Image (cartoon, rainbow, N blue to C red):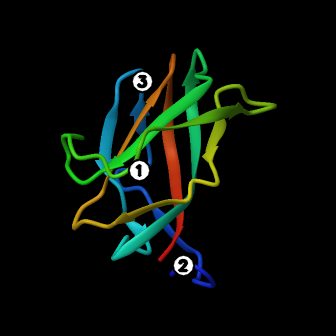
């Protein structure tokens, strides 16, 4: 249980603002700000802020890989429900929580995401993790 009492760390997704999500996977290098993934990682949660939602998606499916082709996944696919803005229908957010996913961080980590329908702009995305 090497994860007990370790500080919570935060990392942001590269290539933002505005990674355009559609119904096919798109990718970007996963970490650009905050703490970088290193050593043994326990992925705890991911929060995504969305804008420019078209035919608003109900979910965002995502995963991490160690290569920019997506052929070497580090995680399974996760599906996060989209919560639409109450006053602005083109804004929203999606969160994946209680992931508890452990992996050994490679030199590069790539983030893959897609909408179940419609499209959205991924404005910000933050991973929360511990060592």
Q: Is residue 115 left or right of residue 6?
A: left
Sooner in the amino-acid sequence: mark 1 or mark 2: 2
Residue that badge 2 annotates: 1
Q: Are marks 1 and 3 in contact (CB under 8 Å)?
A: no
Q: Is residue 37 left or right of residue 83?
A: left
Question: CA–CA distance between discs 1 and 2?
Answer: 34 Å
Question: CA–CA distance between discs 1 and 3?
Answer: 16 Å
Q: Nearer the viewer, mark 3 or mark 2?
A: 2
Quick one: SS at disc 2? loop
Residue 42: where, in percent of width, then height? 49, 67
Q: In the picture, which quadrant includes the N terminus?
A: bottom right
Q: Nearer the viewer, mark 1 or mark 3?
A: 3
- Quarter occupied by residue 70: top left
Residue at x-position 61% and y-position 20%:
56
Sooner in the amino-acid sequence: mark 1 or mark 3: 1
Q: How many marks can you see?
A: 3
| Label 3 packing within 10 angstroms: few (<14), some (14-19), many (20+) | many
Residue that badge 3 annotates: 22
Residue that badge 1 annotates: 16
Question: CA–CA distance between discs 3 and 2?
Answer: 39 Å
| Looking at the image, residue 7 lies above or below residue 67 | below
Residue 80: where, in percent of width, then height? 59, 37
- Quarter occupied by residue 55: top right
Residue at x-position 59% and y-position 45%:
49
Quick one: SS at disc 1? loop
Q: Is residue 107 left or right of residue 28?
A: left
Residue 76: where, in percent of width, then height? 41, 43
Sooner in the amino-acid sequence: mark 3 or mark 2: 2
* Residue nearest the observer in this picture, 55 or 106: 106
């Amino acid at each position: 249980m090497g994860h007990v009492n370790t500080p919570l760390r935060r990392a942001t997704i590269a290539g933002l603002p505005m990674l355009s999500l559609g119904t096919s996977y798109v990718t970007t290098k996963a970490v650009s700000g905050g703490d970088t993934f290193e050593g043994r990682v326990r992925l705890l949660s991911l929060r995504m802020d969305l804008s420019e939602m078209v035919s608003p998606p109900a979910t965002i499916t995502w995963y991490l890989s160690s290569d920019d082709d997506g052929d070497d996944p580090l995680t399974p696919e996760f599906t996060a429900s989209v919560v639409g803005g109450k006053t602005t229908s083109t804004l929203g957010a999606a969160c994946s929580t209680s992931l508890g996913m452990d992996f050994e961080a490679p030199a590069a980590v790539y983030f893959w995401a897609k909408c179940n329908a419609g499209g959205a702009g991924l404005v910000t995305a933050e991973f929360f993790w511990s060592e």
